[in-house]
Amino acid sequence: MKKVESAIWVWLLPEEREGAGGEEWVRHGGKWLVFDTRKLIEELAAKLGPFIDSGEIAGGKYWNGDPSGLNVYSLDSKRDRVRKIIEDLGAGTSMVWEYDYAWDKNLRAPFSFLYSWCSKFRTILQSYGVGGAFRLMKAALQERGE
C-alpha cells in the first residue's frame, strides 16, 4: 500500500492499480465511513495495507484532523466482508455505509445517509472549528479544480 498526502487527505492506494472502474463503480462503488480519534484512525489505516494490496479493499483515505474519519472503499458486493475486516482490525461502532455516486441508493436508506452526513459535519467542526471548516472547504474546492 502506498500513501499519497494532500492538504486534506491521506490516500491509501494499492501498489498496483486494478479493480472496478467506470460504470461498475458508479452503480456499485461505495465506502464505509469510520469516525474516531485521529490516533485510532491512523492505526486502523496502517492495518489496511495487506487488504488493499490483495484487492479485498479497493482503497481508503482519511482526513488530517482530530477527531478524524476514514473512508474504506469497496464494491457493494464486498460490503459485508469489508465491514467485518475493519471491525476485526479495531474500528469502533461509529461507522456507516455510503455509495459514492449512486445517490438513488443512498436515498433509499435515508437514516444511514443522514447519519453519514451529520457525522461528517460534526467531525469536521470538532477537528477544525468553524473558521477551519471554511478553510477546509476552500482547500477541497481548490484541490478539485487542480
Image (cartoon, rainbow, N blue to C red):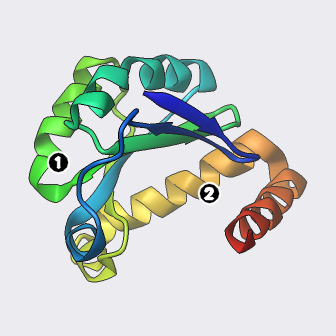
Kindly identify the residue that appears in the image at 38 percent across and 17 percent down.
47
Q: Residue at coordinates 16% horizontally, 57% vertically from top-left? A: 76
Percent position of residue 37, x then y = 58, 26
Residue at the limit of the structure toward the front, as seen here: 16
Residue at the right extreme?
A: 131
Of residues 15 and 38, the one nearer the viewer is 15
Does the CB distance between marks 2 and 1 fall below 8 Å? no
Q: Quadrant of residue 115?
A: bottom left
Residue type of the residue flagged with mark 1: Arg
Disc 2 crowd, CA 10 A, few/some/many (<14, 14-19, 20+): few
Residue 64 image-quadrant placement: top right
Image mark for residue 79: 1
- Which residue position is annotated with label 2? 121
Element assignment for label 2: helix
| Residue type highlighted by circle 2 | Phe
Which disc is residue 100 wearing?
A: none
Question: Which residue is at a point 61% across and 26% down the rendered structure image?
Answer: 38
Give the side of residue 45 with respect to residue 143, left or right. Answer: left
Classify 16 as above or below 89.
below
Residue 128 x %, y %: 79, 45
Whole-percent x, y for residue 122 in the image: 62, 51
Q: Is residue 8 left or right of residue 73?
A: right
- Left or right: 135 in relation to 60: right
Q: How far apart are the alpha carbons under marks 2 and 1?
A: 24 Å
Q: Please say whether residue 84 is visible from this viewpoint.
A: yes
* 2 or 1: mark nearer the eye: 1
Nearest the eye: 57 or 104: 57
Which quarter of the image is occupied by the C terminus? bottom right
Question: Where is residue 18 shown, x and y percent of the image?
Answer: 28, 48
